[in-house]
Amino acid sequence: MHYIIGEQFDVPPVVRGKTDPRTLELNRLSRQFTAPGSYSIFYIRKLHKKAKIQYTFVNEDTGDRHTIDFDTATEADALIAKFKGDSLPDYEDYYASISS
C-alpha cells in the first residue's frame, strides 16, 4: 500500500473529442467516480467476505463520499498514481534487494 488515508488527487472531468492516450485513459478512469473534483482517501478496509479492499474517497469540493472495491491495494495504488501522474516504486524488487 503506497497511498494512505489523507492522500489527495484530482479527478478531471471527461474530455470529449481528444484522442491522445493520456486523455483517453483519464476519461476511462474518471468514469469510476461520481463527479470530477479534488478527492482524498477517507477510509480503507478489507472486505473479508468478498476478499477485496474497499476504499472510500471524499470529494473535497462537495463533501460527497464514494467507495470503490479493489481486488488488491496495488490496484488502488495504480489508479491513484495515474490520476496523480506518479510512477510507483517496484516494492518487490526493493524487498528482494535488501533481503539478499
Image (cartoon, helix red, strand yellow):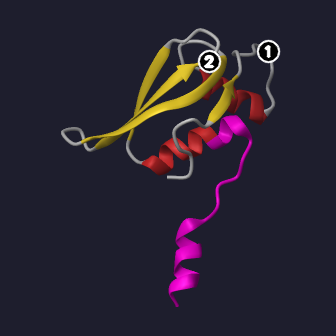
Q: Three-letter amino acid code at disc 2?
A: Glu
- Residue 73 lies, in percent from the top left, at 45, 48
As drawn, which residue projects farthest toward the bottom?
100
Above or below for 6 versus 32? below
Q: Give the secondary structure at mark 2.
A: loop
Residues in magenta, as a range: 81-100
Asked if residue 75 is among those painted magenta in the image, a careful observer would answer: no
Q: Residues within 10 Å of mark 1 (few under 14, many from 20)?
A: few
Asked if residue 83 is among those painted magenta in the image, a careful observer would answer: yes
For the point 58% across and 39% down, which residue is it? 79
Q: Quadrant of residue 30?
A: top right
For the point 46% across and 20% down, which residue is it? 66
Q: Quadrant of residue 60?
A: top right
The chief SS type of the magenta part is helix
- Residue 61 lies, in percent from the top left, at 65, 12
For the point 58% across and 45% down, which residue is it? 78
Relative to the observer, which residue lies in front, 4 or 34?
4
Q: CA distance from mark 1 to mark 2?
A: 28 Å
Q: Which mark is residue 17?
A: 1
- Residue 6 lies, in percent from the top left, at 57, 35
Q: Residues within 10 Å of mark 2 (few under 14, many from 20)?
A: some
As drawn, which residue projects farthest toward the front?
6
**Mark toward the start of the polypeptide (1 vs 2):** 1
How many labels sit on residues? 2
As drawn, which residue projects farthest toward the top?
62
Q: From the viewer's perspective, is the residue at label 1 or at label 2 nearer?
A: 2
Badge 2 is on which residue?
60
Q: Quadrant of residue 23?
A: top right
Relative to the observer, which residue lies in front, 55 or 25?
55
Q: Give the secondary structure at mark 1.
A: loop
Q: Is residue 32 visible?
A: no
Q: Three-letter amino acid code at disc 1?
A: Gly
